[in-house]
Image (cartoon, rainbow, N blue to C red):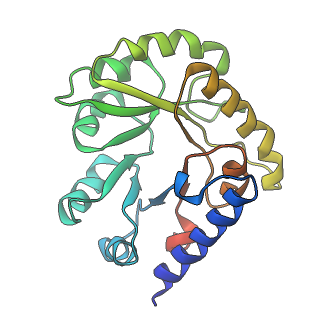
Amino acid sequence: MGEIATNLSAIQDRIAEAATSVNRKPEEITLIAVSKTVPLEGLFQAYEAGQRHFGESRLQEALPKIQAMPEDCVWHFIGPLQSNKAKAIGNLFHIIHTVYNERQLKEIEKCSRQVDVFIEVNIGEEEQKAGILLKDIDDFYQSLIHCKQATFRGLMTIGPRVESSEESRRFFRALKEQNARLGGTCISMGMSGDFDVAIQEGATHVRVGSAIFGSR
């Protein structure tokens, strides 16, 4: 078994352990392999090991990968969503995780198909991060549900940089509470360093890159 396959197996074991620790089923968790900057060969190795969900951050980089990979792959856009590229991204990707402003919605409205979206929340209110603040989320949610081409799935966040993953728990818990209030069925939170805690706090989608493909 190659290194990527070995890493994937280890991640799946950790997902199962985190889920069962809070009486959740491991199959409730979608592992998104963050494949940005990873050569196509790495994606094929992950695919051969059973991985089907991939996360990309740039339209230009993702396009040849999407064209080359088998059709049963599910593509998640997880990078900064430039409004002038939102229509093209919506027509190419299955799910967009980084929607948080009206300009993006206006472009998604022009898509030729329905697009599943997460609202990106700046849960730690960090100046350097994208995403909507919790105090503004209700108004934006109303705009989103009136966008005919966007289907709201839930909330997404990138947790603040902390010393220990345990420090992320309160942020993930707060997102879960807001997600339940809005009626979201999915929550996208947790990355290589903190996905175990995110799963314990309700994550349905975790985004893992370096722990699968190595540092880049």
Q: Which residue sits at x=83%, y=54%?
A: 163
Question: From the viewer's perspective, is residue 6 above or below residue 71?
Answer: below
Q: Which residue sits at x=20%, y=31%?
A: 113
Picture coordinates of residue 114 (x, y %)? 26, 30
Q: Which residue sits at x=24%, y=57%?
A: 66
How many circles with numbers are drawn on the protein?
A: 0
In this view, the residue in front, 28 or 9, is 28
Q: Is residue 56 visible?
A: yes
Question: From the viewer's perspective, is residue 183 above or below residue 196?
Answer: above
Quarter-wise, where is residue 26 in the image? bottom right
72 left or right, relative to 124? left
Picture coordinates of residue 174 (x, y %)? 73, 31
Q: Which residue sits at x=56%, y=46%?
A: 204
67 left or right, relative to 10? left
Question: From the viewer's perspective, is residue 2 above or below residue 105?
Answer: below
Picture coordinates of residue 181 (x, y %)? 63, 20
In this view, the residue in front, 24 or 178, is 24
17 left or right, relative to 111? right
Residue occupying the far bottom of the picture: 1
185 left or right, relative to 148? right
Q: Is residue 126 visible?
A: no
Question: From the viewer's perspective, is residue 136 above or below residue 16?
Answer: above
Picture coordinates of residue 63 (x, y %)? 23, 53
